[in-house]
Amino acid sequence: MSFTSSVYFHLIQKITEEIESLGLKSYESAIQKHAEKPKPVRKPIDLAPLIEHTLLKPEITHRDINKLCDEARQFHFRGVCVNPVFVKEALQQLAGTGCSVVTVVGFPLGANLRDTKSEEAKHVIELGAGEIDMVIALGALKEGNYKTVYNDIRAVVESAESIPVKVIIEAGLLNEREKIAACLLAEWAGASFVKTSTGFAGCGATIEDVKLMKAVVGSRIGIKAAGGIRDFQTACAMVESGATRLGCSASVAIVTEHI
C-alpha cells in the first residue's frame, strides 16, 4: 500500500476515530528534544549522535558493559541502552560525557502487569536512567483492547515524569492496522518515541515499518529504529525513512565502515 494513498490516509483516520470514541485523554510528550532535526548524514561517523549503543543480551557481564561504555565515549554515541541491572554502572562510567543511559521496562515480552512496569520505571529512574524503552502490551493490542494498551503506556509515562519514554511496538508481530493503533496510542499516552522492535522476536526494523510509523506520528514524536541494523547503508535508509534515533549493537562497525 502506498504511504501517500487516500486509502492509507483514511485507515489512519478511521483508527484515530476509534480511539477518540473511547474517551481517552490525549497527552503531549513532556520531552521535545526528539523534535530537533538531525544534521545531514554524509559519512558513517555522522550517525553517531543518533545511535544508542545497545547491549541487552541475557548473558552480558560487567566486562561487556565496560567495553560498551568505552566505545560510547570513543565514538560519541548518543547513549547506551542496557538492562536495568547495569544502569548504575553505566551511569558511573559515562559521567561527564553527555552520553545518555537508556534502559528497558517490561522487556522483552511486554507481558508484565501494569503496576510492575510502573514500579520498574520508578526504580530505574532512581538508579539514574535518562530514558526508558518499554514494551507495549502486545496481546491486548492484538485483541483490539485499546484502553488496556493506553493505560499500560500511560502508567509508565506517569512514573517516568520528565524522563522520555519510548514505546516498543514490536512491529514485526503486528499487521498494518495494529501498527497504526500502537503508534497512535503511544502518542496519546504521552510517549516521546515509538520504537520498531526489541530484537528478541525474530524480526527487526524495516524501512516499510519506519515509513508507516512516520506517516502516523509525523514529527510530533520521535521514531527509534532498532533490530538488525548492522551497516551504514541500512542505518542511513532508516534515517531517510523517518527514524530520529537508532538502536544498534553493531554501532562501531556502522560508524567506522569506510575508515
Image (cartoon, rainbow, N blue to C red):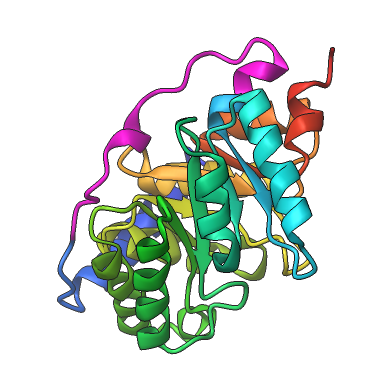
Q: Is residue 26 left or right of residue 12?
A: left
Q: Is residue 206 above or below residue 153?
A: above
In-front residue for pair 9/225 = 225
Whether residue 1 is visible, yes or no, is no
Q: Which residues are magenta?
A: 27-47
Q: Position of residue 147 (x, y in %)?
A: 30, 82
Task: Tell me how many marks there are.
Answer: 0
Quarter of the image containing the C terminus?
top right
Q: Residue at x 49, y 30 (%)?
A: 97
Q: Position of residue 141 (x, y in %)?
A: 47, 78
Q: Is residue 106 above or below residue 148?
A: above
In-front residue for pair 89/231 = 89
In-front residue for pair 184/33 = 33
Q: Residue at x 62, y 30 (%)?
A: 73
Asked if the stretch drawn in magenta spans residue 60, the answer is: no
In-front residue for pair 108/178 = 108
Image quadrant in which you'd find residue 42? top right
Q: Position of residue 53 (x, y in %)?
A: 65, 42
Q: Residue at x 57, y 50 (%)?
A: 90
Q: Is residue 81 above or below residue 251?
A: below
Whether residue 111 is visible, yes or no, is yes
Q: Position of residue 145 (x, y in %)?
A: 38, 85
Asked if the stretch drawn in magenta spans residue 31, the answer is: yes
Instruction: Considering the whole magenta stretch, tell me its main secondary structure.
Output: loop
Q: Residue at x 26, y 58 (%)?
A: 190
